[in-house]
Amino acid sequence: GAVVSQHPSRVICKSGTSVKIECRSLDFQATTMFWYRQFPKQSLMLMATSNEGSKATYEQGVEKDKFLINHASLTLSTLTVTSAHPEDSSFYICSARRLADNEQFFGPGTRLTVL
Amino acid sequence: QKEVEQNSGPLSVPEGAIASLNCTYSDRGSQSFFWYRQYSGKSPELIMSIYSNGDKEDGRFTAQLNKASQYVSLLIRDSQPSDSATYLCAVAPAGGTSYGKLTFGQGTILTVHP
């Protein structure tokens, strides 16, 4: 149990395009999902908290107009990187919080490369 | 500023030995503590969670929590080469607006050599 999927696993795009990343909890409901970014040899940095049916809460320094988050159902959250630039190239990882015990389970991650 | 500190390593132990990973945190309001394992290029995988003082054992893994000292550790017994990875300590507060938000340490790189 506690499986979280992410799609796509890898994406390469041109500068200026938008990229949508999906995060799904497959066998449990997640009222809260989190989006992280991890640069090489660094730890995970929380970008935003996504709550089902409400607006996402962004961490300080994260541009909400650039990183659009939608949490339309109890099992799906999406992150859209708008007008991506090379500095947005990173490993984006979502996690879903299981309501019963507050444990978080991570998706496999999406490696974004912006040319 | 809330912080989670780990001994960055790298930590190298021989196969079969005990690996000891340590973590301290600054927010006394923290209530949930987690250890994740992350292989290179992969996302973190939950190994252990611990919520109350003392030890919690799961197979070869033992997590230890001391809230008074704001210290949490992970022991890996009978270390195997497949345990070689980066181990992340994560801490979550009790509630409020930060409920469920994890703060990660910088990770400890563990290498288990045959």
Image (cartoon, rainbow, N blue to C red):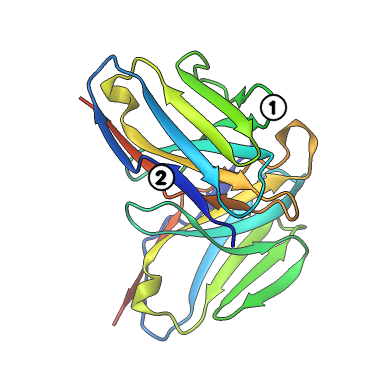
Which residue occupies the foreground of this view, B88 or A54? A54
Above or below B22: residue B79: below
Q: Name the residue that disc number 2 marks.
A: A109
B47 left or right of A52?
left
Q: Is residue A76 above or below residue A69?
A: below
**Image spot of residue B48 (x, y percent):** 61, 65
Local packing at callout 2 (Cα closer than 10 Å; few below 14, some 14-19, many 20+) is many
Residue that label 1 marks: A53
| Amino acid residing under circle 1 | Gly
Query: Picture coordinates of residue B47 (x, y %)?
Result: 55, 65
Amino acid at dot 2? Gly
Q: Residues within 10 Å of mark 1 (few under 14, many from 20)?
A: few
**Image side of residue A112 versus residue B60, left or right:** left
Q: Chain of mark 2?
A: A
Instruction: Return the x and y of residue B49 as percentages of the image width and height.
Output: 65, 62
| Label 2: element kind | loop
